[in-house]
Amino acid sequence: MSEEVAVRLEEASAHRGAHTVWSGVDLTIGRGEFVAVLGPNGSGKSTLLDVVLGLLPLGQGRATVLGRRAGGANARIGYLPQRRSFDSGTRIRGLDVVRLGLDGTRWGIPLPAALSASGRAARRRVDEVVELVGAGPYAGRPIGALSGGEQQRLLIAQALVRRPEMLLLDEPLDSLDLSNQGAVAGLVQRICDSEGVTVLLVAHDVNPILGYLDRVVYFAGGRGVEGAPREVIDDATLSRLYGAPIEVLETSDGRLVVVGTPEPPAHHHPRHGHER
Amino acid sequence: MSAELAALSWNPLVDLEQLTAFPFMIQALEAGTIVAVMAGAIGWFMVLRRQTFAGHTLSVIAFPGAAGATLAGLPLAFGYFGACALAALALSLLARPGRDGLGGESAAIGTVQAFGLGLGFLFVSLYSGQLTDLESLLFGTFLGITATQVQTLLWVALVALAALALIGRRLLFASVDAAVARARGLPIRALATAFLLLLGLAVAATAEITGALLVFALLVTPAATAQRITARPGPGLALSVALALAVTWLGLGIAYFSPYPVGFWVTSLSFGLYVAVRCGAHLARPRPAEALS
């Protein structure tokens, strides 16, 4: 049974020092699901990733990840931290950045591929995963010379290169323009389907990914709920969560706009030129 | 430089024979070769990590180290290596890695550098005299290299390069992508300290030959040129070493037949190479729209 479950939290609470980030959280994420982690700034979205990775022990409750205690299965998890774009002067190819995800923690220096079978296998795996994210045409160029969207695809390839069973992506869409947000979200869903990978994606705007999601985890007011996107992003659920009257409006093209949150909605706030 | 200059015969074999006729020249070539390999490889990582300023500080610290050793009657190598190792440790304490794991405390580093220069000046004036010594401390001397010095350099280089090979892949990961490397459990801080120590060794070894002020001709320029030419790590490292070797050998060779000092030739050659590569890259790129994203 537990084989069907990727992440399970039971009566979980997380603390940073004396501050309780959230408490009383129950959630179950099935294998192969594409799940968005949503909520206002500081509500504990990235904290959930830290808990899943076992970097932050729970104050109360239990966390099970891929059938183990949290932290026990990290070798089977691909993690993309909040970022982080490469300086334009970084003279390393995208291919090399992906390759570092495969064997960058090993000692020594790699032998030239011509001399070693494992070097050839590593190169094949890197090419394969670069193809998978569609970065083939530019993976050979210095990563600093690439656009934010191109860099993000290569970083997803880096997180995927060790064939993880689960991907944790912390705001991967943050520095991208709208069309790239949609494209990267579509790519993540395709990988989720074709490779059977469970995906937890932290986002501050649900709309670019709404059409691709299986489930949503929403944190606010020190609590969290989990469910199908339309069940969670809903007047009654969010009002209960925030403890304030919340209205969810749906535009004619199916986008959701959350109105009445204690802080301004995140999705039209001006970007600060993250895109390079 | 000797008073009676050797004359260039323009016959490569004869000239090579002239070059290697004296033991001091053979020792200079040996020492130059060892130093070029070490500086080329470690310099490549330094340029990639954007720690050129830290490298510069270490090279400036090499000067008070050497001057202090002269004053105390210790071997020069002792002063160079001791000062650079101490300074590397100090820098790694000062440069608290930020989110990207690389040292950003340039003001603090600059302070250390200024103090180091002041100390060096004090030692030189306490030593009272021999301005020729000051000149060779700052601008190097190929011609006074002894066989013992060559042997010391060889051992230092072997140890440093073995250590670099051992941590090479992890250091590359931590340098390029510190956030993910940290999440994957790499000790970013320890790697940064280890690298600064290696950099200190490379600077000290190079300073013995090029002098404290011309270290960069071998440490920065070949690496920066190589990174202009290729973004592939393996070939880039090899190219950086090859360029450092070429510049050293050519510089020594030309200096032997010319009245100008070897430090001048080595720096000029590597500078010329860098400019040529940048101009070449500029001409070879007919796409001005590339910068738009």
Image (cartoon, helix red, strand yellow):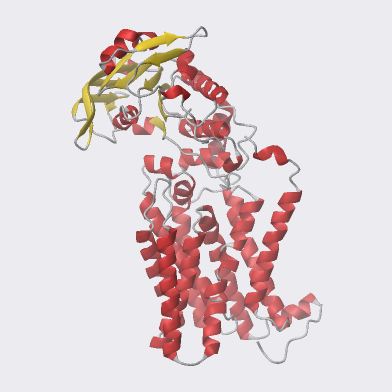
Measuring from the top left, give residue B107's x and y in whole percent: 43, 61
Name the image quarter holding the C terminus of chain B. top right
Q: Quadrant of residue A238?
A: top left
* Residue drawn at point x = 44 percent, y = 88 percent: B125
**Along the viewing direction, whichever of A72 and B260 lies nearer the viewer:** B260
Farthest right residue in view: B10
Name the image quarter holding the N terminus of chain B. bottom right
Question: What is the total number of numbered labels drawn onto the structure image?
Answer: 0
Q: Is residue B146 visible?
A: no
Measuring from the top left, give residue A227's x and y in whole percent: 33, 12
* Residue drawn at point x = 52 percent, y = 19 percent: A186
Vertical order, B138 against B48 (above or below):
below
Q: Quadrant of residue B289?
A: top right
Farthest top residue in view: A252
* Residue drawn at point x = 44 percent, y = 48 percent: B174
Vertical order, A22 against B49 (above or below):
above
**Along the viewing direction, whichever of B52 and A133 lies nearer the viewer:** B52
Measuring from the top left, give residue B266's x and y in whole percent: 65, 72
* Residue drawn at point x = 45 percent, y = 92 percent: B128
Apparent side of residue A131 relative to residue A218 in the rendered image (left or right):
right
Q: Is residue A22 visible?
A: yes
Vertical order, A256 against A181 (above or below):
above
Apparent side of residue A183 relative to residue B292 in the rendered image (left or right):
left
